[in-house]
Amino acid sequence: MILTRSSIDVAGRRARALEWEGRRVRVYDSAMLALRIGELLADEQVDAYYKRELMESMLVVDVEAARAALEDFDGFLAHAAWEVAGVDMDGSHAAESDGPQVIDWEQDAGHIQATLWQVYGRSFEEIAPRVSLRQLGGLIGACPHETPMGQAVYYRTAKEPKHTKYNSEEVKRFRRLRAHWAIRGAEGAGAARSKNDQMTDMANAFKRMARRAGA
């Protein structure tokens, strides 16, 4: 994957076109934007109405044109929020929102940063504006087994080796590493949390990381 190219470049920001009502509407689309949306959702001092207004300007390249062209702008905004940030604004993705949790954005923040440096030679802050949230997940998921996140994903998802009289040490080692990489306060990969909750975790984790990096 080429990290320095975008689907569409709009004033230096990564964007793409989404289909809605037979039209192509441009939206901003990056993992960094998804992070900002997560920060907005996590901010309890901003009321829901203002959050919605901010999300419109954060997501849609030309809000006025989109409002004029679309009959169901609200539906489009909910669609864009899901596509870009995995945020289910209208509850239409409930079945997709909840599922096994493999990455804990807060617990794994340091592991993710270290893994991106190790594999791609770039920090999260460099990569996130250049790729979508889905692509970021793909980059993390494709990391080699020996990286921190490669280990975390493997031991949270792999089946335990079948115990035989010849592999007792292998099984013990697997169990030890599975316990080490388990998501704290959850039942590992079997624990389900909503995408909205996971986005908030992601925002909080990387906001703290950014503060530490700038200190």
Image (cartoon, helix red, strand yellow):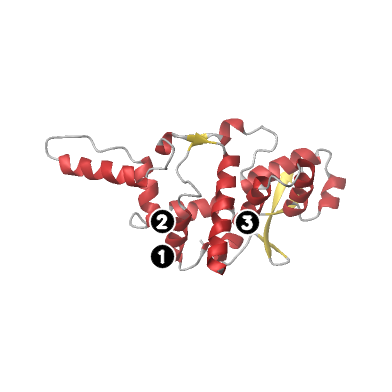
Q: How far apart are marks 1 and 3 (CA)?
A: 22 Å
Measuring from the top left, give residue 213's x and y in whole percent: 53, 67
Residue named by callout 3: 30
Q: What residue type is labelled 3?
A: Ser
Q: Is mark 2 on a helix, strand or loop?
A: loop
Residue at the disc numbered 2: 143
Q: What residue type is labelled 1?
A: Gln
Q: Label 1, label 2: how many angstroms apart (C-alpha)?
A: 9 Å
- Label 2 is placed on what type of residue? Cys
Q: Quadrant of residue 71?
A: top right
SS of the residue at dot 3?
loop
| Residue pictured at 70% horizontal, 34% vertical | 90
Q: Marks 1 and 3: CB-CB under 8 Å?
A: no
Which is nearer the N-term, disc 1 or disc 2?
1
Of label 1 and label 3, which has the lower sequence position?
3
Q: What separation in Å lies between label 3 and label 2 (alpha carbons)?
A: 20 Å
User: What is the number of the mark on residue 118?
Assistant: 1
> x and y percent of residue 111 in the render?
43, 56
Identified at 81% across, 55% down, the residue is 62
- For the C terminus, the image quarter is bottom right
